Image (spheres, rainbow, N blue to C red):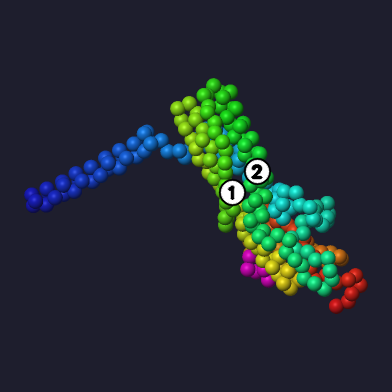
Amino acid sequence: MAKINMEKKGQVTIFIIMGIVIVSAVLVFFLWAKPTYLSEGGRKLNFENCVEDVVEQTISDLEKNAGFEDPKFTYKYNGEEFAYLCYTNEYYKTCTVQVPFLKNNFDEQMEAAIKDKVNTCYSNSISELEAQGYSVTKGEVTYDVLIEPGVVRVEIEAPTVVGSSSFAKFNVRINSPIYDMVMLSTSILQFESSYGDFDTSSAMLYYPDYIIGKIKRSDGTTLYTVENKIFGNKFQFASRSLAWPAGYAI
């Protein structure tokens, strides 16, 4: 019995030692190593919230223009410009996709569109801290935009020292269906370029979270809208494929 009690005490002692080691390691990490990514830093700088607003607005603007900040080739309908993503100026022929890699284009347009605004967010945050009497050392801002299923992330490098605290990395995350919307639009374009049309009714059975609108115009142009029922986001574009001359009866 005494031997069993000794073994139990030994096990308890080992657990206590392990607990002390773990706590000590955590304290050393935060008090001495000073990790470069702290979400509190983003809130203190009032930087991340500003970038979130910028990204949300930019996504909304790009969706309306088929992923372009300033589309050049469009079809005007009810006061809106629908950018052509697939087009042919001939009759009886299927269209040619104008943007072969739609998601890559959206990524590039997004990065370009938010560049100046992200820098402005950072500068304004620094100015606010300086106005409050903080000693601030700022660095160069670089970032990457990552569009993934269900989310848009912006990973930002911005080495900053505020008083005795230092920050380097900020991660902005926006819940958004834009990835799926762009991929669904890509599927529509593949059908338009191959067959001249897309069956929206069948597609909505496979994608119940989406409303896919299609408006046929007299010149052979088709206007598509891909709307997410949950978020309300709407991606829209135009296509002219397998058009028929006016008055032609099928």
Q: Nearer the viewer, residue 141 or 171?
A: 141
What is the three-letter code of the residue carrying label 2?
A: Ile
The kind of secondary structure element at disc 1 is strand
Corner quadrant of residue 228: bottom right
Q: Which mark is residue 114?
A: 2
Corner quadrant of residue 235: bottom right
Tell whether 40 sits left or right of 227. left
Instruction: Give neighbour class at mark 2: few <14, some 14-19, many 20+ (Cα, 10 Å).
Output: some
Magenta stretch in the rendered image: 201-207
In the rendered image, residue 37, in percent from the top left (x then y), is placed at 47, 40
What is the three-letter code of the residue carrying label 1?
A: Val
- In this rendering, the answer to whether 6 lies above or below 77 is above
Residue that mark 1 sits on: 145
Could you tell me which residue is drawn at 59 percent across and 34 percent down?
122
Q: CA distance from mark 2 to mark 1?
A: 10 Å
- In this rendering, the answer to whether 80 lies above or below 127 is below
